[in-house]
Amino acid sequence: MGIDLGTANTLVYISGKGIVLQEPSVVAIDRETKTPLAVGEDAKKMLGRTPGNVVALRPLRDGVIADFDTAELMLKHFIRRVNEGNSLVRPRIVIGIPSGVTGVERRAVMDAAIQAGASDVRLIDEPVAAALGAGLPVSEPTGNMIIDIGGGTTEVAVLSLQGIVLSESVRVAGDELNEAIVQYLKKIHNLAIGERTAEDIKIQLGSAYPTEEDDDTMDVRGMHLLSGLPRTVSIKSAEIRESMSEPLSVIVEAVKRTLERTPPELAADIVDRGIVLAGGGALLKGLDTLIGHETGIVTHIAADPLSCVVLGTGRVLENFKQLERVFSGRSRAV
């Protein structure tokens, strides 16, 4: 079983079946009994809308486990679901994690998976998994550059011969873009909106580079900070791009820093092959154009950016012997 344990979404791949589950990484818990009421899509609908005795949590922040018990509950639920309730099955699990996490954070992921019912847990760095899932020739002695923009982290990596030559992990990604939109509307329009509304705005109006759709507008409902009453405000695509410019510049700088440190032979390969974008953030309109413009290197979006990491874990499972060197950590159930 391969798992992309993401800040925003968790995806599960089973050998021979493909991707069997794609759900938001959210758990709704009853405060009094500490029992989960909903997990995944049902819990996401509750974000910002729960009564006092229920709390909707995202157990992962910046690509790592922030709430161990909730993460374990979520993993247990998803593993049980894909095994159709059979709790006797103890699968071998490959989990994709950000390359910049600490040893303690790696241990937390492995422990959560063991507690959730895994017999053998292997960790794979997300850039390697994303490159495998995007179909890049990772095993060959050529340079490949991948940028994996998730919910909590952006991973920039140069890969060759099944390993990471250089990588940089910045904790600026989809969540930071949402937060930038929230702050912009608060500052410019005196309008308070929630996380889910900010994400809808980003998907509908968001862009990283000027496009023909700059005049597109959207009506946004929220609470007016001065009157304390609900209000609707009309916003333009260009405003949303301006609001996201700061976090996007952090991502672009990380790409430039990685390119500056890349050995000349591998840099030449990257110029030939281009840069590949993966992760949910790759779907932001014009991001490939922005990175291409800033670096001077052609930038492509992977065929299925959202699923690259989990498809990569699947490829490792199906070619276990040939790709065994890609793992960055291992733990077995006692």
Image (cartoon, grey):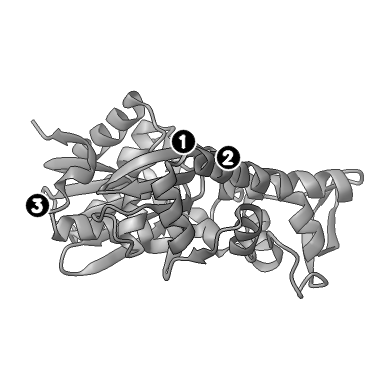
Quadrant housing the N terminus: bottom left
Quadrant assignment, res 288:
bottom right
Whole-percent x and y of residue 313? Answer: 26, 55
**Residue located farthest toward the right when viewing the structure as drawn:** 227
The nearer-to-camera label among 2 and 3 is: 3
Identify the amino acid type marked 2: Gly
Quadrant housing the C terminus: top left
Q: Residues within 10 Å of mark 3 (few under 14, many from 20)?
A: few
Residue 159 or residue 110, whichever sits in front: 159
Dot 3 or dot 1, earlier in sequence = 1
Which residue matches tag 3?
Answer: 321
Dot 1 or dot 2, earlier in sequence = 1
Identify the amino acid type marked 1: Arg
Which residue matches tag 1?
Answer: 31
Residue 34 or residue 188, whichever sits in front: 188
The image shows residue 38, relative to residue 114, as above or below, that is: below
Residue 228 or residue 11, whichever sits in front: 11
- Does residue 208 appear left or right of residue 260 in this picture? right
| Residue at screen point 76% across, 43% down | 183
Is residue 280 at all visible to an observer of this figure? yes
Identify the amino acid type marked 3: Lys
Q: Residues within 10 Å of mark 1 (few under 14, many from 20)?
A: few
Marks 2/3: CA–CA distance = 51 Å
Contact check, label 2 and label 3, Cβ < 8 Å: no
Which residue matches tag 2?
Answer: 52
| Residue at screen point 41% across, 56% down | 269
Whole-percent x and y of residue 169? Answer: 47, 38
| Residue at screen point 60% across, 53% down | 295
Contact check, label 1 and label 2, Cβ < 8 Å: yes
- Does residue 274 appear left or right of residue 312 in this picture? right
